[in-house]
Amino acid sequence: MIALKTKSELELMRVAGRISAQALALGGEMVKPGVTTAQIDHAINKFIKSQNAIPSFLGYGGFPASACISVNDTVIHGIPGTREIMPGDIVSIDVGAIYKGYHGDNAATFAAGEISEEAALLIERTRASFYKGMEQAVPGARVGDVSNAVQSYVESFGYGVVRDFVGHGVGRDMHEAPEVPNFGKPGRGPRLAAGMTIAIEPMINIGAYAVKILSDGWTVLTADGSLSAHHENTVAVTDNGPVILTKV
Ligand code: MG
């Protein structure tokens, strides 16, 4: 079953979304050579708590930090630690916050100093693919319309769309129905309705779509070592079109 949120629930999700978006922006500003991923995570944790919210990821399935920080060929679920960011790195930060029982969830990829042109294009196109998908998230459309819009856009550049991890409904739980894959056929999958809230989150590799998981059980890497980018927002499906709830 897909939960429909009431107006007042959407207002709470807007607050959770704002806190999540501000935490993401704060993390993004810290992406600089010499900074460790743990330093970014600590700042994000402190900020979320200062907003009377709870970091969604901390302890989720045993995850040991408040943000997933994924560098270069790490796709998602990077565990913050002593790794120092290097010039030219691309750094994906994924962070969520719970406010009064409701989740916000968002992610973006940031550049550390000067990055290669291919890396910059990957980040820009991954971000653009989120909007291609979001445009389809209207009442009456199908999840497959969102999925296909993301896939057809990024595959036109020869990129790989990660298949093993997908977007999701979000609300009282961080992961709710429906699943929102970044690949699929238009006209297929669950039908969207006003009041649904979904996290659309393309994870895009410069190379092939295959990924592997490190022995820590979390860190997801591209199988071919190519760079990967991520862009995510929590989106409400409304009669007036899609609305991003994770806004600063
Ligand atoms: Mg998510």
Image (cartoon, helix red, strand yellow):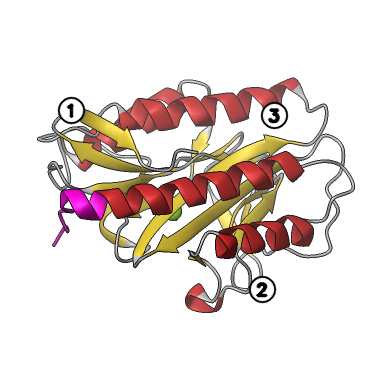
Left or right of 191, for residue 102: right
Pointer 2 or 3: first along the chain: 3
What segment carries the magenta color?
1-10
- Vertical relation: 228 (above or below) 167: above
- Magenta span contains residue 7: yes
Q: CA distance from mark 2 to mark 3?
A: 27 Å
Residue 131 x, y percent position in the rendering: 39, 27
Q: Looking at the image, can residue 78 be seen?
A: no
In this view, the residue in front, 121 or 92, is: 92
The residue that disc 2 covers is 215
Residue 28 x, y percent position in the rendering: 67, 41
**Badge nearest the viewer, 1 or 2:** 1
**Circle 1 SS class:** loop
Residue at point 28%, 62% (across, down): 176
The residue that disc 1 covers is 240
**Badge nearest the viewer, 2 or 3:** 3
**Circle 2 SS class:** loop
Left or right of 122, for residue 19: left
**Residue type indicated by callout 2:** Ser
**Residue type indicated by callout 1:** Asn
Residue 76 x, y percent position in the rendering: 58, 54
Residue at point 87%, 42% (across, down): 33
- Vertical relation: 32 (above or below) 45: above
**Residue type indicated by callout 3:** Ala
Q: What is the number of callouts on the image? A: 3
- Magenta span contains residue 15: no
